[in-house]
Image (cartoon, rainbow, N blue to C red):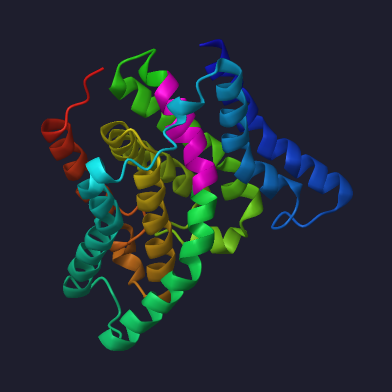
């Protein structure tokens, strides 16, 4: 418990500390110490504490590919299927300004291919900390539902320096169907708690973080690709948005979580 609390406090502080140093030395937030500490803190703290506890194997660094091949397939295609479903419901529900389909597909694929490698590396640093360390520790302390909610809350709070300071405000708002910054933050908390249930279940079903790195990467890349290349009608964007805090996406994610809860119950 003590080390879990230490991990949580430090991981939430380091990004802000880095931003404070950036302000003092007049660095740009987009490439300064704050961004570096924000990205690296979860994995560095997780690895350091795990080595100290002599539990490095508990981070789930093995691929376990052979026995979990179906989960890897699921993780690769999950967001592709869900976001396509959201897109086509929005398209035929007149929530999207129509664009030539072939051109749209070509642009989205090219955008995704460019961003997959860097996003995958970024998510390795994230998932070693969140699913590799924090989820593993909390599952041994409390029931899995409370652990999922707690990880989701901490994971969301860790994002605050990025949401509020590092990413340009107009870009952050542009990737959301809402225009009020605090409403975006609140809905992002709701989204990440929901994703925490899904990602933690995958992590414990496979005993590996790598499927989660994959699904996390596909989520980030597809959201960015769709938002960059699709025009949504403002009056219904809150519902049809492909972002993780769009209402339709959240409803579909909830249905998937309920199904997996029944199909693959977590037994401690």
**118 sits to left or right of 87:** right
Q: Is residue 202 visible?
A: yes
Tell me if residue 74 comes above or below residue 155 in the rendering. below
**132 sits to left or right of 200:** right
Residue drawn at (57%, 35%) of the image = 42
**261 sits to left or right of 231:** left
Residue drawn at (30%, 79%) of the image = 97
Toward the right, the furthest residue is: 25
Counting labels gives: 0
Tell me if residue 165 comes above or below residue 80 in the rendering. above
- Measured from the top left, where is residue 16 in percent x and y? 69, 38
The quadrant the C terminus occupies is top left
- Measured from the top left, where is residue 183 in percent x and y? 45, 46
Q: Residue 219 or 128: which is nearer the viewer?
A: 128
Q: Is residue 100 visible?
A: no
Start-end of magenta stretch: 124-137
Tell me if residue 16 comes above or below residue 215 in the rendering. above
- Measured from the top left, where is residue 148 in percent x and y? 35, 28
Residue 135 part of the magenta-drawn span: yes
Q: Main secondary structure of the magenta part?
A: helix
Residue 105 part of the magenta-drawn span: no
Residue drawn at (39%, 41%) of the image = 192
Residue drawn at (20%, 70%) of the image = 88
Which of the 4 image quarters holds residue 144? top left
Q: Residue 157 or 130: which is nearer the viewer?
A: 130
- Measured from the top left, where is residue 91 in percent x and y? 22, 74
Tell me if residue 253 comes above or below residue 111 in the rendering. above
Q: Residue 131 or 154: which is nearer the viewer?
A: 131
């Amino acid at each position: 418990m003590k080390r879990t609390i230490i991990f949580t406090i430090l991981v939430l502080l380091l990004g802000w500390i880095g931003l404070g140093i950036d302000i003092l030395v007049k660095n740009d937030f987009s490439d300064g110490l704050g961004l570096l500490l924000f990205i690296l803190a979860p994995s560095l703290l997780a690895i350091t504490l795990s080595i100290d506890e002599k539990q490095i194997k508990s981070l789930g660094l093995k691929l376990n590919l052979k026995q979990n091949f179906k989960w890897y397939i699921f993780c690769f295609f999950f967001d592709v299927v869900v976001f396509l479903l959201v897109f086509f419901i929005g398209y035929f529900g007149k929530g999207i300004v129509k664009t030539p389909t072939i051109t749209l597909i070509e642009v989205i694929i090219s955008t995704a291919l460019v961003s997959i490698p860097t996003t995958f590396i970024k998510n390795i640093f994230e998932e070693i900390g969140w699913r590799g360390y924090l989820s593993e520790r909390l599952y041994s302390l409390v029931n899995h539902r409370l652990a999922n909610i707690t990880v989701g809350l901490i994971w969301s709070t860790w994002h605050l320096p990025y949401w509020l300071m590092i990413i340009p405000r107009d870009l952050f708002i542009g990737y959301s169907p809402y225009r009020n910054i605090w409403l975006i933050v609140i809905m992002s908390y709701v989204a990440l708690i929901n994703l925490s249930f899904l990602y933690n279940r995958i992590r414990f079903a496979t005993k590996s973080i790598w499927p989660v790195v994959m699904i996390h990467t596909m989520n980030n890349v597809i959201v960015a690709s769709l938002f960059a290349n699709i025009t949504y009608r403002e009056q219904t964007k809150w519902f049809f948005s492909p972002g993780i805090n769009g209402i339709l996406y959240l409803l579909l994610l909830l249905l998937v979580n309920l199904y997996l809860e029944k199909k693959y119950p977590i037994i401690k």
